[in-house]
Image: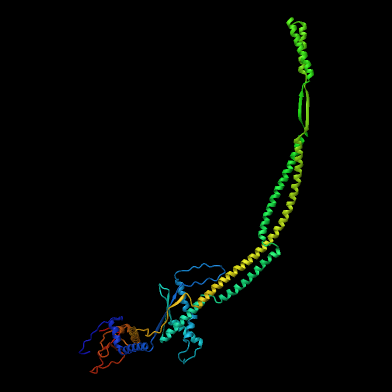
């Protein structure tokens, strides 16, 4: 090229985005970006102005002022009352509020299931319309349990302030009704009333049987009579044992008396006397005295060995021997032995006692048998009476139980009728006067939405644009070395041409590179 100097510049082959590139994209698509930004911003503001949303609130307090009795067969149920409401109970009440039963009643009462316009494409059945309204209500309704409180806050937003308050009023009423139905047993009062009447009839029948029982058995209290009979039977058995013991003792006594009678004489000596023979002794003593006197005279005259003296001594010795040999006369008196008589009498008495004891034992055994038969009959009557008493007691317990349960059910029903529940509406919904949206928040939201939509549109258009916006894109996409790039002062950026494309002529009519064109080649640069 004559008169011009060709400057060859190396360009990076990778694409790098800078803030200037991003801003350049906005300037390149400035008209479209402005239209998009203005349209979204104005559309958001128009939507907020034309379709305002009104928010109504209501609050429900969950408390523990009422405790319903447990329906069971127990006579009394211990009431375990917790001071605080548990988190599970709060969540349960929240789920009841959001249940289909409650929300479907609200939809029906407030007319949300009525179609608001005409359907051009297809018609819906009333059930489908109600289901759609139910889903819309569930998505719009906000039910939350406030932390560290016993309060449930319910928020509903709609395009009409009266509708918001009306929906929450209907929701409170439907929730209280469902809560009341879920915490009570349907037909409880009628059931216990019927059971109490049946138990009263059973009690009267059992009492009539108890009244007729003494007429049949003849004993008013068989149990007491049986106990008394058993006591007397024990006494009879005790007396029979004593009698048998007495029989054994008497038999042993008779045997002993018989053995004693064998060794006891029937008579014994009562008096025994011994006396000497007076005349014979007197004569012999007199003879002895004479002989002693005679010897005394002879001794005084003669010697002791004198034969007459010796003869006299022999006579004196014989006389003394006769006196010594003389036996006294005995006198013995006998009489009946009193011991023998006592033995005989005791033996006769013991035999009589033995017969009496034996007769008494026989009679006692007969009495014991009769008493045992009577005791068995009284025992059977007592069992029958106890069975009647248990039946009457069970009927009485059932009557008292059902009467108490009937009274509890009546009290619960009265509490339900007077709307005395464990939940209360602490804040009733009111018709809101101002929309729920803040103008500043709407403006900020519209600005952010318009900016996001505009940025997305610009980036999308840039991505879908097939032209090259910088030398790096050329080198990266074509994978060819870039010789030179001249900025396009008129359109901005770079104009890319290929060797097959006809080049515009310069002012001199030559086919050289003009300002803003880039020439690329696959051959080496010389």
Q: Position of residue 238 (x, y in %)?
A: 68, 50
- 119 relative to 244, above or below: below
Give the quadrant of the C terminus: bottom left
Q: Is residue 38 above or below residue 419?
A: below
Is 329 in front, or is 209? 329
Quarter of the figure with residue 16: bottom left
Residue 442 picture location, percent across and down: 34, 84
Residue 163 position, x and y percent, is 43, 86
Quadrant (top left/top right/bottom left/bottom right) for the N terminus: bottom left
Residue 205, visible in the rendered structure: yes
**Relative image position of residue 522 (x, y in whole percent):** 30, 84
Quick one: which residue is furthest to the left in this view?
A: 3
Between 74 and 222, the residue placed more toward the observer is 222
Residue 132 in view here = no
Q: Which of 433 and 225 lies nearest the eye of the viewer?
A: 225
Q: Quadrant of residue 26?
A: bottom left
- For the image shown, how many numbered marks are present on the structure? 0
75 to the left or right of 83 = right
Q: Residue at x 52, y 74 (%)?
A: 412
Residue 198 quadrant: bottom right
Left or right of 120 on screen, residue 198: right
């Amino acid at each position: 090229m004559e008169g011009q100097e060709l400057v060859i510049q190396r360009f990076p082959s990778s694409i790098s985005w800078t803030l200037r590139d991003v801003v350049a994209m906005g300037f390149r698509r400035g008209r479209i970006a402005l239209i998009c930004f203005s349209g979204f911003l104005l559309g958001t503001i128009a939507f907020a102005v034309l379709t305002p949303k009104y928010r109504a609130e209501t609050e429900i307090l969950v408390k523990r002022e009422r405790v319903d009795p447990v329906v069971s067969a127990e006579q009394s149920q211990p009431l375990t009352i917790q001071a605080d409401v548990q988190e599970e109970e709060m969540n349960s009440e929240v789920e009841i509020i959001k249940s289909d039963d409650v929300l479907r009643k609200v939809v029906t009462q407030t007319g949300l299931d009525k179609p608001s316009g005409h359907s051009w494409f297809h018609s819906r059945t009333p059930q489908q319309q109600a289901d759609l309204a139910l889903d819309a209500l569930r998505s719009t309704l906000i039910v939350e349990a406030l932390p560290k409180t016993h309060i449930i806050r319910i928020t509903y937003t709609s395009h009409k302030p009266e509708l918001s308050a009306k929906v929450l009023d209907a929701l409170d009423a439907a929730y209280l009704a469902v809560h009341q139905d879920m915490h009570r047993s349907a037909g409880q009062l009628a059931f216990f009333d019927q059971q109490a009447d049946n138990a009263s009839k059973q009690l009267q029948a059992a009492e009539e049987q108890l009244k007729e029982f003494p007429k049949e058995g003849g004993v008013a209290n068989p149990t007491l009579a049986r106990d008394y009979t058993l006591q007397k039977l024990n006494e009879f058995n005790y007396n029979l044992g004593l009698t048998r013991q007495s029989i054994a003792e008497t038999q042993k006594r008779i045997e002993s008396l018989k053995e004693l009678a064998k060794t006891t004489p029937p008579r014994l000596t009562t008096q025994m006397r011994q006396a000497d023979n007076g005349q014979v002794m007197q004569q012999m003593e007199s003879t002895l005295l004479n002989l002693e006197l005679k010897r005394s005279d002879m001794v005084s005259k003669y010697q002791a060995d004198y034969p007459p003296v010796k003869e006299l001594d022999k006579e004196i010795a014989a006389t003394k021997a006769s006196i010594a040999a003389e036996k006294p006369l005995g006198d013995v008196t006998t009489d009946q032995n009193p011991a023998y008589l006592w033995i005989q009498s005791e033996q006769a008495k013991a035999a009589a006692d033995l017969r009496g004891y034996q007769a008494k034992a026989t009679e006692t055994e007969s009495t014991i048998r009769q008493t045992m038969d009577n005791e068995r009959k009284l025992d059977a009557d007592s069992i029958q009476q106890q069975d009647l008493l248990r039946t009457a007691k069970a009927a009485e317990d059932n009557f008292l139980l059902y009467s108490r349960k009937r009274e509890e059910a009546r009290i619960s029903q009265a509490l339900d009728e007077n709307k005395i529940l464990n939940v209360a509406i602490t804040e009733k919904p009111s018709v809101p006067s101002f929309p729920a949206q803040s103008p500043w928040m709407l403006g900020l939201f519209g600005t952010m939405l318009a900016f996001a939509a505009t940025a997305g549109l610009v980036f999308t258009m840039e991505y879908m644009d097939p032209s090259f916006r910088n030398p790096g894109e050329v080198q990266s996409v074509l994978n060819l070395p870039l010789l030179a790039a001249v900025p396009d002062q008129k359109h901005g950026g770079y104009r890319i041409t290929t060797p097959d494309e006809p080049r515009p002529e310069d002012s001199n009519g030559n086919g050289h590179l003009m300002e803003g064109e880039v020439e690329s080649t696959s051959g080496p640069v010389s």
